[in-house]
């Protein structure tokens, strides 16, 4: 049988390889693969239990290495599964920092139910932490801004559409008109850049 | 008012302020504005850059930002129009003009505070003295009052006591006569002064020409601020090369500027200690050939599409083609190599190409093909002559399409200047190839069909249909200059090299407007162009509505239907 020629632990390893190789931020949860690995673990375990009981009964030392080998394979499968889940959790955490508290629709489809719950919980605790980290009470710090320190306080932007007047904190009024180029404080125009009204020129 | 000390009187004034930079549509201006932006970035000054085309654009741009900004820098625009009258700015707004167009408007020159022209007053030619063109109107009014008041008194007194003092009225009468005489004299003097002023002003504004490259001027400011680097220098070089290629600078003054730039080049090369060939940019001075984009094109194509070599060898004719082959033969350049892209040519041939052409230049009457210029190299593959940049940017700037406004083109050209956007530049080079090939084909067909007509004192050439390339001022200018040279090369008339050419191309079929460009005669080395003034006067005489919106005075727009009437008037005016 072809199934018999396969080595123990191969499926679990494939699972990890798939995850590592995928170019998406987070690939769909491989339900089938996980189930197969679990089945394999179960099969190994049952075989081991059966042989262990005969070993106990007969005291046949020749079974001893086989038992140990099966146990190692079982442990490896477990480790692989855990690594798979852990890596996905890590990516989900990164997701929170990158995309904010709401998961984009296409990514949400790739997650399984418990992962979504994990995300929500993580999001909640992060929000709670950000609230408590604010120096003056009631004003939470958004830690997800500026993940990398900005190179300069000002950025060069190009206006993509007619926006009209835009007032800076210091009272300067800037007329944002399509195709004009400006040099403005980063912090104040960041939201406009996100909205696509301004385009950051590298 | 001229501002000579750019560091103290221009830059220091601006530090920490918010600035509006208004940039004209030309490459020199783009380069200058890029250098300015780099400077302002160093000092964290907020700025806004607005590209404009023509006087209406300037008015609109200023109108939109009016009230928000107090300092406006005009790059390559506005020097030749009376800024204060045109824009009606508030008292506290200051304009700094960095313009290479000449002659400068006298009101700008004599403005005492609001308008500052960057540059050296002593370098400017024959600016009329203040007294000769501005009349002190206040003093005149006073005198009028004085002269009228006594008269009034005299009339009153004369009615009451005429028979009493007999001598006094006589003397008064005398003086009245004298006064009258004086007034007549004064009026005559005034009229004389006025006609003298008109003469002076006419002489001053008769020719339009160009001063120093704006980019170079701004680069020198950067140098004085010790904020210069290789990139800024390269932009300045591109700016001045544009002036050379578009005939905005005399070859003599170009050579003078070259020396200065060379010293900047060697200074900056020694200063940078980046020895890594991959990342270091290097500018080198070298003698190069006046061949369009030859580093990116097959040699035969480049020779054919270059104005100078093409016209000297008459490459649009069959005989010219033979002569080109003869030249290649004598150079020892196999046709296989000459017909493939320069970059794919044999390395040995590539290395010797310049010397091969130089050796034979004299014999084939293309001696002027050699000129001094700079090349930029970075990495292993990128090597560009300043002229390559200019042609590519020109092509990008005029690549207006349906979904691509002129502003988009401007910004793209400005992006293509920086090294990070190499793909934009190579796209521009491809575009430039198309443009030059189109110019050549147009010249060939027009010369064969004898479409260049003589009007006695100038040639004219009228394109009948809208054209994808030539409906834009720079491309039409390129075409006109190529055409004039080609026509002169084939014409037997002796005075042909001394005659200028006017080319016209319809702009927009729906509106019926057409573009008119006047270029200087072939023999003329200086960029002095009298067409700006001549167009204006011809329009006045013939009553044609002329749209002199561009900052290049020799580029105008008018109604297609008025064209013949306008040309007739121009013929009368210039003979």
Image (spheres, grey):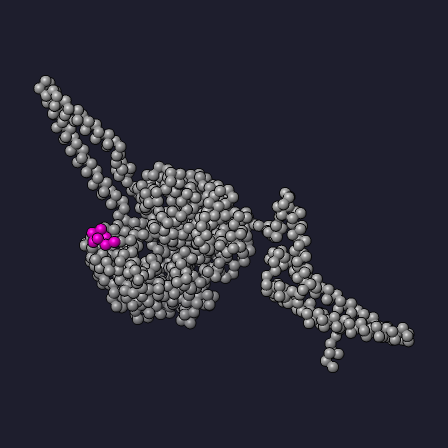
Q: Quadrant of residue A65?
A: bottom right
Residue A188 percent location from the top left of the image: 53, 48
Residue depicted at x 34% and y 50%: B55
Q: Is residue B381 above or below residue B111?
A: below
Q: Which residues are magenta?
A: B538-545
Asked if one can make out residue A157 in the rendered structure from this viewpoint, the answer is yes
Q: Which of the two residues, B382 or B65, is positioned nearer the viewer here?
A: B65
Q: Quadrant of residue B94?
A: top left
Q: Residue farthest to the right?
A: A58
Residue B323 percent location from the top left of the image: 33, 68
Question: Secondary structure of the magenta portion, mostly?
Answer: helix
Residue depicted at x 33% and y 69%: B321
Q: Residue farthest to the bottom?
A: A1
Question: Is B139 situated left or right of A109 in this image?
Answer: left
Q: Which of the two residues, A65 or A123, is positioned nearer the viewer here?
A: A123
A125 in magenta:
no
Residue depicted at x 74% and y 81%: A1
Asked if one can make out residue B481 in the rendered structure from this viewpoint, the answer is no
């Amino acid at each position: 049988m072809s199934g018999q020629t396969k080595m123990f632990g191969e499926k679990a390893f494939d699972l990890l390889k798939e995850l590592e190789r995928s170019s998406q931020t987070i690939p769909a949860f491989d339900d089938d693969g996980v189930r197969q690995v679990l089945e394999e673990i179960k099969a190994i375990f049952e075989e081991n239990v059966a042989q262990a009981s005969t070993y106990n009964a007969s005291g046949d030392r020749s079974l001893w290495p086989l038992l140990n080998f099966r146990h190692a394979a079982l442990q490896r499968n477990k480790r692989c599964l855990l690594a798979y889940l852990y890596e996905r959790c890590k990516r989900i955490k990164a997701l929170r920092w990158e995309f904010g508290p709401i998961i984009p629709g296409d990514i949400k489809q790739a997650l399984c139910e418990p992962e979504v719950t994990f995300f929500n919980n993580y999001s909640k605790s992060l929000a709670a932490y950000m609230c408590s980290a604010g120096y003056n009470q009631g004003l939470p710090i958004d830690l997800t801004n500026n993940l990398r320190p900005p190179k300069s306080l000002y950025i060069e932007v190009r206006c993509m559409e007619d926006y009209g007047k835009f007032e800076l904190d210091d009272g300067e009024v800037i007329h944002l008109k399509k195709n004009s180029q400006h040099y403005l404080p980063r912090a104040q125009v960041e939201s406009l850049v996100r909205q696509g009204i301004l385009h950051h020129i590298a | 008012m001229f501002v000579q000390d750019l560091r103290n009187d221009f830059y220091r004034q601006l530090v920490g302020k918010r600035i509006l930079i208004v940039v004209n549509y030309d490459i020199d201006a783009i380069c200058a504005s890029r250098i300015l932006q780099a400077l302002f970035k160093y000092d964290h000054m907020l700025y806004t850059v607005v590209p404009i085309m023509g006087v209406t654009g300037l008015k609109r741009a200023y109108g939109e930002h009016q009230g928000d900004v107090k300092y406006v820098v005009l790059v390559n625009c506005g020097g030749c129009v009376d800024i204060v009258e045109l824009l009606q700015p508030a008292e506290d707004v200051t304009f700094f003009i960095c313009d290479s167009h000449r002659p400068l408007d006298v009101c700008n020159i004599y403005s005492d505070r609001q308008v500052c022209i960057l540059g050296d007053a002593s370098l400017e030619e024959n600016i009329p003295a203040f007294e000769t063109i501005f009349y002190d109107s206040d003093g005149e009014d006073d005198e009028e009052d004085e002269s009228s008041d006594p008269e009034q008194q005299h009339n009153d007194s004369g009615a009451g006591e005429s028979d009493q003092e007999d001598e006094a009225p006589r003397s008064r009468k005398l003086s009245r006569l004298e006064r009258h005489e004086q007034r007549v004299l004064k009026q005559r003097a005034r009229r004389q002064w006025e006609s003298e002023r008109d003469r002076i002003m006419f002489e001053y504004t008769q020719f339009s020409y160009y001063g120093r490259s704006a980019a170079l001027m701004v680069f020198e400011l950067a140098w004085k601020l010790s904020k210069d680097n290789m990139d800024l220098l390269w932009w300045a070089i591109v700016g001045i090369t544009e002036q050379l290629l578009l005939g905005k600078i005399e070859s003599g003054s170009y050579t003078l500027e070259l020396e200065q730039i060379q010293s900047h080049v060697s200074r900056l090369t020694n200063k940078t200690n980046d020895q890594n060939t991959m990342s270091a940019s290097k500018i080198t001075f070298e003698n190069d050939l006046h061949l369009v984009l030859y580093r990116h094109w097959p040699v035969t194509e480049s020779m054919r599409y270059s104005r100078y070599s093409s016209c000297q060898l008459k490459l649009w004719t069959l005989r010219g083609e033979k002569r080109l082959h003869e030249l290649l033969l004598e150079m020892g350049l196999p046709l296989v190599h000459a017909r493939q892209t320069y970059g794919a040519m044999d390395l040995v041939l590539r290395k010797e190409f310049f010397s091969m052409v130089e050796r034979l230049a004299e014999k084939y009457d293309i001696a002027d093909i050699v000129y001094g210029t700079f090349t930029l190299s970075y990495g292993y593959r990128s090597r560009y002559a300043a002229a390559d940049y200019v042609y590519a940017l020109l092509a990008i700037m005029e690549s207006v399409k349906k979904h691509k406004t002129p502003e988009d083109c401007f910004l793209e050209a400005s992006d293509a200047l920086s090294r990070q956007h190499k793909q934009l530049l190579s796209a521009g080079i491809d575009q430039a190839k198309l443009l030059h090939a189109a110019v050549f084909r147009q010249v060939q067909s027009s010369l064969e069909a004898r479409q260049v007509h003589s009007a006695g004192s100038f040639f004219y050439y009228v394109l009948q249909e809208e054209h994808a390339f030539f409906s834009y001022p720079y491309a039409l200018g390129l075409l006109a200059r190529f055409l004039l040279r080609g026509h002169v090369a084939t014409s037997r008339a002796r005075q042909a090299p001394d005659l200028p050419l006017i080319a016209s191309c319809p702009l927009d079929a729906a509106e019926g407007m057409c573009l008119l460009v006047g270029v200087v005669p072939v023999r003329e080395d200086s960029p002095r162009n009298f067409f700006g003034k001549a167009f204006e006067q011809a329009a006045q005489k013939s009553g044609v509505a002329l749209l002199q919106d561009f900052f290049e005075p020799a580029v105008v727009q008018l109604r297609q239907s008025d064209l013949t009437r306008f040309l007739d008037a121009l013929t009368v005016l210039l003979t």
